[in-house]
Image (cartoon, rainbow, N blue to C red):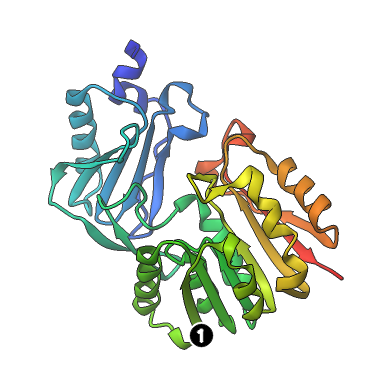
Amino acid sequence: MNNGQNNLLLQLAKVPFQMPRSHQAQRLFHGRSHVYKDYKHIAIDWLSPVILITLYQEVVACELKELAGKLFSAVSECSSVQVQYRYQQTGPIELLLGEVCTQTIVEENDLKYQITLGRARNTGLFLDMKNGRDWVKNNAKGKRVLNLFSYTCAFSIAAIACNAASVFNIDMSKQSLSTGRDNHRLNDHDTDKVSFDSLDIFKSFGRIKRSGPYDLLICDPPSFQKGSVDIKRDYKKIIRRIPEFMNPNSLLMLCLNSPDLDTGFLKKTLAEECAACQYITEILPPAIFINAIEQQGLKVLIYQYRT
């Protein structure tokens, strides 16, 4: 590490820092955006009452403690500052200051989501997808929604909040789907309108088709999972099934998280595998997440399937 990378406080003092607004879950600092070259190993989130520092490379321990102290003092509602070492294989989390807190419930636009710290590499809510959830909340009313790679069902929460007719959540992780059920209960939703299936999507196209057709497809796949998903190879397998799954004039939200693939990859795949899909718009992430290297940020495209 060079001297510039060592002094976290000196670095962070030079950049605009977003302070928490009430209990709304949000990113406070996003070094991963590459806007600030020397800070790309740091991200800081507000998951009330926890400030979570995420590190993508090793830093000096005493300076990390000093940074934690500054954050703890600056945010009066904070009762716990924790750090996640994402550069380590399991992404362990350590308490730096304050109280032990392994679970909390956060809010985003009047909706509630359960957050778990230390059990897995991810907390249960991807903050960069806020604008995508807002779009779903504004567009799912009355629709039958197919939510592929649903994780903890945050899109499902947004859809039911705006009176979607139904949501079919599919993910391989039973634990994530269980959290999804809890999230719906937290929001006092009618769970009779929501289904949860732990399935390998690529081996379950028949099951998906039988439960359709759908009016809104949400597809937010991981970039790579050993033995199950390689999105560069596999996205086309989903796209070519759109005519089997979807109603005419249905909407498609297609997400891409791979730093190695840009929006051109998605557009080319749609053109080759389902030419009846018409591009509508792109949903950008919240401003703090916009990446200086366009390809490396989150990509979300909206299409309409027209026959």
Which residue is pictured at 32% across the width and 36% down the height? 89
Q: Secondary structure at mark 1?
A: helix
Of residues 36 and 234, the one drawn nearer to the viewer in this rendering: 234
Q: Quadrant of residue 254?
A: bottom right
Which residue is pictured at 67% across the width and 76% down the height? 214
Q: Position of residue 98 (x, y in %)?
A: 13, 47
Question: In the shown orientation, is residue 109 left or right of residue 231?
Answer: left
Q: Looking at the image, is 195 positioned above or below residue 258? A: below
Q: Looking at the image, is 50 positioned above or below residue 184? A: above
Q: Is residue 140 visible?
A: no
Which residue is pictured at 85% across the width and 57% down the height? 275
Q: Looking at the image, is 237 positioned above or below residue 287? A: below
Instruction: Kindly give the residue lying farthest to the left in the view shown.
Output: 99
Q: Is residue 108 visible?
A: yes
Instruction: Kindly give the residue lying farthest to the top in the view shown.
Output: 2
Numbered disc total? 1
> What's the amino acid at mark 1?
Lys
**Quadrant position of the C terminus in the picture:** bottom right
Which residue is pictured at 45% across the width and 53% down the height? 126
**Quadrant position of the N terminus in the picture:** top left
Please give the residue where the numbered disc 1 appears in the rendered image.
Answer: 193
Q: Position of residue 165 (x, y in %)?
A: 59, 84
Question: In the shown orientation, is residue 285 left or right of residue 275?
Answer: left
Q: Position of residue 279 (x, y in %)?
A: 79, 56
Of residues 213 and 1, the one drawn nearer to the viewer in this rendering: 213
